[in-house]
Amino acid sequence: MGHPVTEVADKISWYCVALLGIMLVFNFCESTTTKGDQMEKLDVVGLTRRACDEIYVVGEGETLQSISEKCGDPYIVEFNPHIHDPDDVFPGLVIKITPHFTNL
C-alpha cells in the first residue's frame, strides 16, 4: 500500500478533476442558453450588434434612420442602389443590411 499522504493527495486530485469537469459542463450549458443575454450585454458596453437579417423588409412607420440605428448599418443607401430617394421608404420595401460593428 502507498504512503498515506500520497493516497490523500490522489483522492484530492481526483475530486478536483471531477469538480473541474462539472464546472465545464455547467459553463457550456450556460453559454448556450444565455447567448441572447450576452448579445444584449454587448450593447450596454457600447458595441453595435447585429439586430437584423441581411435581407430586411421595411415595416409600417419605419424610416431609413430608424432601420439604420436598429440594424447597425449607417450605409443603407450606399448598399441599396434601388433606393433613389431616402425619404421614399415604404412598408414592404426590401433592403440589404450590412452591419458595421464599431467600438465606441
Image (spheres, grey):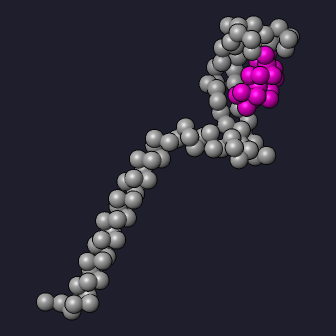
Instruction: Count the marks.
Output: 0
Quarter residue 3 falls in: bottom left
Observer-nearest of 75 and 5: 5
Quarter residue 53 falls in: top right
The residue shown at (78%, 16%) is: 63
The residue shown at (70%, 24%) is: 97
Compared to residue 65, the image places residue 22 above or below, namely: below
The residue shown at (26%, 83%) is: 8
Compared to residue 32, the image places residue 2 above or below, namely: below
Quarter residue 1 falls in: bottom left
Q: Which residues are magenta?
A: 63-81
The residue shown at (81%, 22%) is: 65
Compared to residue 53, the image places residue 40 above or below, namely: below
Q: Position of residue 18 (x, y in %)?
A: 31, 65
Q: Say if the magenta span includes residue 78.
A: yes
Please give left or right for residue 29 compared with residue 63 in the image: left
Observer-nearest of 22 and 68: 22
Please give left or right for residue 31 compared with residue 96 in the image: left
| Furthest-left residue in this view | 1
Please give left or right for residue 38 compared with residue 25 in the image: right
Compared to residue 49, the image places residue 53 above or below, namely: above
- Visible residue check, residue 77: yes
Q: Position of residue 27 (x, y in %)?
A: 44, 53
Q: Say if the magenta span includes residue 67.
A: yes
- Visible residue check, residue 94: no
Q: Position of residue 30 (x, y in %)?
A: 45, 47
Q: Position of residue 103 (x, y in %)?
A: 76, 46
